[in-house]
Image (spheres, rainbow, N blue to C red):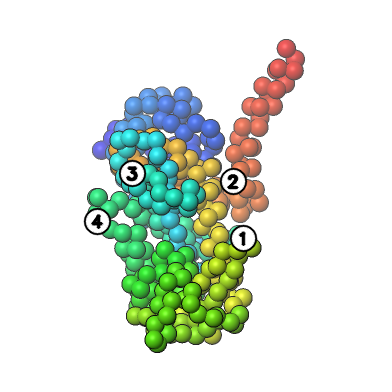
């Protein structure tokens, strides 16, 4: 066990207030106690921040609050990192292509557009554990059930709508709204979704290997065609669209983690350090999000309030010189 004076409280507080430098060296320069950057690096590599720590922080805000369960993944870009552990080739939506990075699968509990919290996550690293992102998805479904939660709906994009995943959701007694690939086979005889004439009110059809679902076809303002399915065959197109659009909260989470919590700013080589840093960034986001709700201030405004006094003093000094 590390004997470093560094602590989870100190590290999260540092991530909470800094907005430019996130390294161990930077923390050692501003820490209110005598800390070397080597000591901080050792602490980060020897600590053990796990998904259950996020759950312990989030559960007070999740229990008793009916909501939907949203899944999505984010890639921490490490395209310029040569020997860093946990880095794998994978598709990154932000780059619209394959890149090197650390994949994180997140489960988010959303009560409303403003009220949502990440409650579980997994690091995707097949060389270490042999698990796919779908395996992590199914594990987190089981964890959600074991924690006594009953989501109104499970929502995800087409990446997570594999047959095994859909059956896993059903096995817990839950319903789902998810994107479907255009080549998914439906009906009898089987036909691809893209070959069907789907009316505005949707089409109740038999999804191969699963059962009866209702499918909708939506065309975005950019001309892209999306197929969205649901296990609730009584839902209208507006209801399905509303559920699916609520996925946007997890996109906001990922952006804020990167831009205000330093998620992508760790250069540690060891996988344990990278795992800890991911967990610490999520715990820091929880702190900043609670302040957002209490003080009605964005995470970006919180960062500005920290640096604003220093900028004011520096600006005044330069104007007087």
Pick the front one: 236 or 180: 180
Q: Position of residue 69 (x, y in %)?
A: 47, 67
> Mark 1 to mark 3: distance in Å?
33 Å
**Residue 168, quarter of the rendered image:** bottom left
Mark 2 = which residue?
299
- Which numbered disc, 1 or 3, marks the residue that appears first in the sequence? 3
Q: Is residue 286 left or right of residue 89?
A: right
Dot 1 lies on which element? Answer: loop
Dot 2 lies on which element? Answer: helix
Q: Is residue 259 left or right of residue 280?
A: right
Pointer 4 with pointer 2, Cβ within 8 A = no
Instruction: Mark yes or no: residue 17 visible.
Output: yes
- Which numbered disc, 3 or 4, marks the residue that appears first in the sequence? 3
Mark 1 = which residue?
222
Mark 3 = which residue?
87
Residue in view at x 45 percent, y 43 percent: 263
């Amino acid at each position: 066990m590390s004997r470093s004076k560094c602590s989870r409280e100190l590290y999260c507080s540092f991530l909470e207030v800094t907005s430019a430098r996130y390294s161990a060296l930077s923390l050692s320069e501003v820490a209110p106690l005598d800390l070397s950057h080597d000591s901080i690096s050792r602490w980060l590599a020897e600590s053990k921040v796990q998904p259950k720590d996020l759950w312990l922080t989030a559960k007070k805000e999740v229990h008793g609050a009916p909501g939907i369960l949203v899944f999505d993944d984010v890639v921490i870009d490490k395209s310029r990192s040569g020997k860093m552990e946990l880095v794998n080739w994978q598709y990154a939506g932000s780059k619209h292509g394959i890149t090197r990075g650390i994949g994180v699968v997140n489960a988010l509990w959303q009560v409303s557009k403003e009220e949502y919290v990440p409650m579980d996550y997994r690091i995707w690293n097949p060389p270490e554990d042999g698990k796919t992102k779908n395996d992590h998805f199914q594990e987190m479904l089981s964890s959600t059930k074991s924690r006594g939660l009953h989501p109104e709906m499970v929502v995800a994009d087409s990446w997570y709508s594999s047959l095994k995943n859909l059956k896993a959701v059903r096995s817990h007694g839950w319903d789902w709204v998810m994107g479907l690939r255009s080549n998914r086979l439906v009906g009898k005889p089987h036909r691809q979704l893209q070959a069907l004439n789907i009316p505005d009110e949707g089409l109740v059809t038999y999804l191969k290997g699963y059962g009866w679902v209702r499918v909708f076809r939506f065309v975005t303002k950019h001309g892209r065609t999306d197929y969205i399915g649901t296990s609730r065959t009584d839902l209208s197109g507006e209801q399905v669209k509303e559920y699916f659009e609520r996925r946007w909260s997890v996109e906001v989470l990922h952006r804020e983690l990167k831009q205000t919590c330093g998620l992508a700013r760790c250069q540690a080589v060891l996988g344990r350090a990278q795992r800890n840093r991911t967990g610490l960034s999520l715990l820091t986001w929880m702190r900043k999000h609670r302040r957002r709700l209490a003080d009605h201030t964005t995470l970006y405004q919180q960062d500005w309030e920290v640096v604003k006094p220093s900028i004011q003093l520096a600006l005044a000094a330069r104007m007087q010189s």
